[in-house]
Image (cartoon, helix red, strand yellow):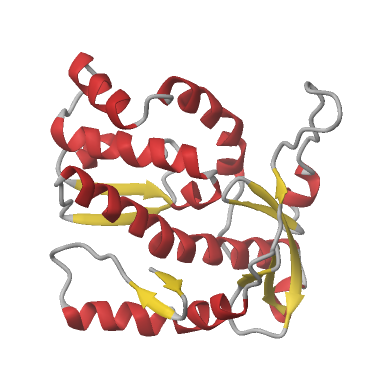
Amino acid sequence: MRLDNDVLKVVANCFLSEKKLRQIIMQNVDWINAQKKVSAAAVAIPLKCEKDEPNAHEEPDWQSIVHGRKTVVSGRLTNVLAGTCSKPYAEDGVLYIPEKSYQNKQSRLFAIGSYLKRVASVQVAEEAADFGSKVALCPLKIAFGDIKEYWVNCSAASKRVLRFDFRIAQLPQNLRNYVIVHGFAHMVYPIHDGEFWNYVEKYAPDFRECSSALKEYNILKNLSYKD
């Protein structure tokens, strides 16, 4: 689901009914309205950004992340502030959460988690559907949950069900792409054999680098976004 010149474009599972599609759109009406306000010049802070020296990096502020005052969205460190809104939304590189949710650590994390789940169910689901169209594969279901052990459930994918950890919304685009390709590969090849990795490499040539880079984000799975 995305807005393109004020036109809402939705890519959905081929088994999804028009009624269910309308329900999903209505459930995300706040997000849709918020996206209309997002500035094209919005800039966020990279999780690791290069400074003057090629090997110098700015480390993420983990203490602020753990306490819900910052978070990571699409690989970018994002400030979290209280806003006059009923649901969390992002604007100009800032994630705004309802003022009542900003009062303590756990309520902040819960609000952040709800936003990440919404981004995953809309944006990442669209990315997965786009890739499925590209390779002519249609999963029976695309779902997101609190998996923690994996970014995508490999055994479920072998049964044509793509079940991702909702924190996939926190990964940068290239790593999300790799996780999505990994999941679709299991729809064709159930186990991690040579044919499986050949398929992955075909659509994610940098899969080795991506697999290694994913380890940097595993720490995010230690956060509890439950109320």
**Where is 130 relative to 184, above or below?**
below
Specify the quadrant that holds the N terminus: bottom left
Q: Position of residue 116 (x, y in %)?
A: 53, 60
Q: Quadrant of residue 153?
A: top left
Which one is nearer the viewer's eye here, 189 or 67? Answer: 189
| Residue at x 37%, y 85% (from the top left corner) | 26
For the view shown, which residue lies furthest in the top direction?
194
Q: Quadrant of residue 25?
A: bottom left
| Residue at x 52%, y 31% (from the top left corner) | 214
Q: Quadrant of residue 27?
A: bottom left
Q: Position of residue 92 (x, y in %)?
A: 70, 67
**Where is 135 relative to 3, above or below?**
above
Q: Position of residue 157 (x, y in %)?
A: 22, 41
| Residue at x 55%, y 42% (from the top left corner) | 221
**In the figure, is residue 41 to the left or right of 137?**
right
**In the figure, is residue 8 to the left or right of 113?**
left
**Where is 11 relative to 138, above or below?**
below
For the view shown, which residue lies furthest in the front direction?
5
**Where is 43 relative to 25, above or below?**
above
Which one is nearer the viewer's eye here, 183 or 41? Answer: 41
* Count of numbered circles in the view: 0
**In the figure, is residue 60 to the left or right of 9?**
right
| Residue at x 18%, y 19% (from the top left corner) | 195
Q: Position of residue 121 (x, y in %)?
A: 39, 62
Specify the quadrant that holds the C terminus: bottom right
